[in-house]
Image: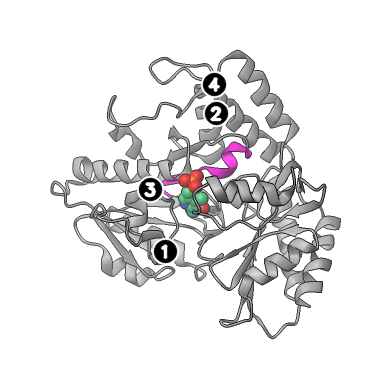
Amino acid sequence: METSEYISLENEYGASNYKPLDVVLTKGEGIWVWDVDGNKYMDCLAAYSAVNQGHCHPKIFKAMNDQAKKLTLTSRAFRNDQLPLLYKELCEMTNSHKILPMNSGAEAVETAIKCVRKWGYEVKGIEEDKAEIIVCNDNFHGRTLSIVGFSTDDNARDSFGPFPAGFKIIPYGDAEALEKAITKNTAAFMVEPIQGEAGVIIPPEGYFKKVREICDRNNVVLVLDEIQTGLGRTGALLAEEHEGIEADLTLIGKALSGGFYPVSAVLSNKEVLEILKPGQHGSTFGGNPLACSIARASLQVLVDEGMIENSKKMGEYFLSELKKINNKDIKDIRGRGLMIAIELHEGTEGGARAIAEKLQKLGILCKETHTYTVRFAPPLIIKKEEVDWALERIKQVLG
Ligand SMILES: *Cc1c(COP(=O)(O)O)cnc(C)c1O
């Protein structure tokens, strides 16, 4: 079948809640993907950081394949021999006490919301149904109703109400605003260490130190959504390390799957997760042995193959080279690790979409976020020659 035939089938039968680039991919290996016409591209989106380990990583594939032949799903009505090992490995790696496994990122966020509310009532002593969770402007935490209910992106929220109450929105990167927003009913502050979907927004230096201190002083649970920033993307296992703090709850997903199969988890440093008793929360697929074996292998290759250090090193190189580009349309170039963005001035002809389309023709796949920002977030296994290859093409488009 031809590219155009795939596209028209998709347009005819699929819901149109996405506007993908017109490239139909059929194969992936490492940082590279191929379309149905045999064109090869460097994947500079890495499925929004779900394939940090590179496409079809052979060791993750093997773990998945071996496990799929043995046992895939038990439900949590019975125990399986993979989940305890994932718990142990993940706790040791992240210095956590407790883990709750789910599937998608949004489910991990929902789980955190439920836990901190229950904690608020049963431990902090908040009056029934009064618990508040503080979140930030331009947040992205997923697509479920409660989550889009506190989104500040009209496109994500409009016409989906009514929404659950109990969320307060403050500016991102503003510790004073947090201090002011906290009341006796505040159970938690949930925030991204770097706002990915908002366009790689990095908060001011020292912000999270202040946030940590404010949460401690007010007995407020700090929830870091590291679904995108976690697992090596920013050049550290968790982005909180750059800030020298530890969250009370950390949410991970995306790359926990190595891109094979959705796996997410709530990591708890305090005993917030202890609040849940049997029957109060669950998921048919959460913690299944196939997911656990994939997650275990995904974490293992991240560490064994030095992907986190590589992300730091290649990210620094990529960013410093990008910063040498001189173009009047560029407003800002920023990043941490291999989470990098180029922001164009408002009103730049064609916006970021035009850049993504030009780069596609030169063999690089990336995606605009909002109208004027292009993000570069390749798998963490990218080599220097490959960064150079990408830079050459980015310079052709922007230089
Ligand atoms: C992608 C993402 C989510 C949602 O994950 P899904 O698996 O798409 O539900 C939540 N938070 C952040 C920061 C994300 O980047």
Which numbered disc flags the more N-terminal residue, 4 or 1?
4
Side of 287 relative to 77 (left or right): right
Q: Which mark is residue 15?
A: none
Q: Which residues are magenta?
A: 247-259
- 10 Å crowding of disc 1: few (<14), some (14-19), many (20+): few
Label 4 element class: loop
Q: Are marks 2 and 3 in contact (CB under 8 Å)?
A: no
Between the residue at mark 4 and the residue at mark 1, the CA separation in whole angstroms equals 40 Å
Which numbered disc flags the more N-terminal residue, 3 or 1?
3
The nearer-to-camera label among 2 and 4 is 2
- 10 Å crowding of disc 4: few (<14), some (14-19), many (20+): many
Q: Which residue is painted at 63% across and 68% down in the image? A: 353
Question: Looking at mark 3, is its residue's CB closer than 8 Å to ligand 1?
Answer: yes
Query: Is residue 80 something that shows in the picture?
Result: yes
Identify the residue under disc 4: 82
- In the rendered view, how is the structure colored? one colour
The nearer-to-camera label among 2 and 1 is 1
